[in-house]
Image (cartoon, rainbow, N blue to C red):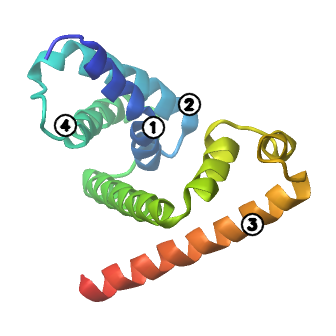
């Protein structure tokens, strides 16, 4: 793959997850930021190695894993660090946590689709567009308090729906 807009979008989309993955392995925000920059550089340089249509997450997390290991080797003389077995476990745990996050996001998206179009619009305006309750109320011809109550009910509905979906998945899995 070349340095296309799609590849740049993938790198951008995964920045938060890669940072969380690296942070879970290093436990230090400054070090995680430093390693994330190294990861971005390696991903960019190795973009031709990525096969479009394959899992960018798996590929980028593997690159991240190796970059953390290289960083650790550079740091090992300076301080006490986790042994390789502990770091491998942290790496597996971080991947599992990200998988759980993806499952919860998928459940939330499914639950969002069950909402009425009007309620989805309220959620989008508030959480995605960052509109205030007053702004939403003006568009919907409702008071800010009424919008707040609507958001409260929607949140409660979504929490219950995601929780119910999780229980169903636990029973099925």
Circle 1 Cα neighbour tier, 10 Å, few/some/many (<14 / 14–19 / ≥20)? many
Which numbered disc flags the more N-terminal residue, 1 or 4? 1
Q: CA distance from mark 1 to mark 4?
A: 15 Å
Q: Are marks 1 and 4 in contact (CB under 8 Å)?
A: no
Which numbered disc flags the more N-terminal residue, 1 or 2? 1
**Left or right of 147 on screen, residue 105:** left
Q: Give residue 30's mark.
A: 2
Which numbered disc flags the more N-terminal residue, 3 or 4? 4
Image point 40% across, 26% down: which residue? 12
Which numbered disc flags the more N-terminal residue, 4 or 2? 2
Which numbered disc flags the more N-terminal residue, 3 or 2? 2
Q: Which residue is mark 3?
A: 152
Circle 4 Cα neighbour tier, 10 Å, few/some/many (<14 / 14–19 / ≥20)? some
Q: Give residue 59's mark.
A: 4
Residue 63 visible in this rendered orientation of the protein: yes
**Left or right of 30 on screen, residue 57:** left
Q: Quadrant of residue 149?
A: bottom right
Q: Which sits in the foreground, 48 or 136?
A: 136
Q: Give residue 19's mark.
A: 1
| Residue 83 percent across, percent down from the top left | 31, 52
Q: Quadrant of residue 19?
A: top left
Image point 24% across, 12% down: which residue? 4
């Amino acid at each position: 793959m070349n340095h296309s807009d799609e590849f740049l979008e993938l790198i951008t989309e995964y920045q938060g997850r890669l940072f969380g993955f690296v942070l879970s392995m290093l436990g230090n925000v400054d070090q995680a930021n430093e390693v994330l920059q190294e990861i971005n550089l390696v991903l960019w340089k190795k973009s031709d190695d990525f096969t479009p249509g394959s899992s960018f997450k798996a590929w980028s997390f593997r690159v991240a894993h190796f970059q953390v290991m290289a960083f650790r080797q550079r740091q090992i003389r300076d301080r006490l660090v986790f042994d390789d077995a502990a770091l491998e476990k942290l790496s597996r745990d971080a991947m599992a946590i990200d998988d759980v996050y993806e499952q919860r996001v998928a459940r939330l998206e499914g639950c969002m689709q069950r909402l009425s179009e009007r309620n989805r619009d309220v959620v989008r305006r508030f959480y995605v567009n960052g509109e205030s309750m007053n702004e939403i109320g003006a568009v919907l011809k409702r008071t800010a308090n009424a919008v707040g109550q609507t958001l409260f009910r929607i949140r409660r509905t979504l929490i219950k729906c995601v929780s119910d979906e999780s229980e169903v998945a636990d029973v099925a899995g």
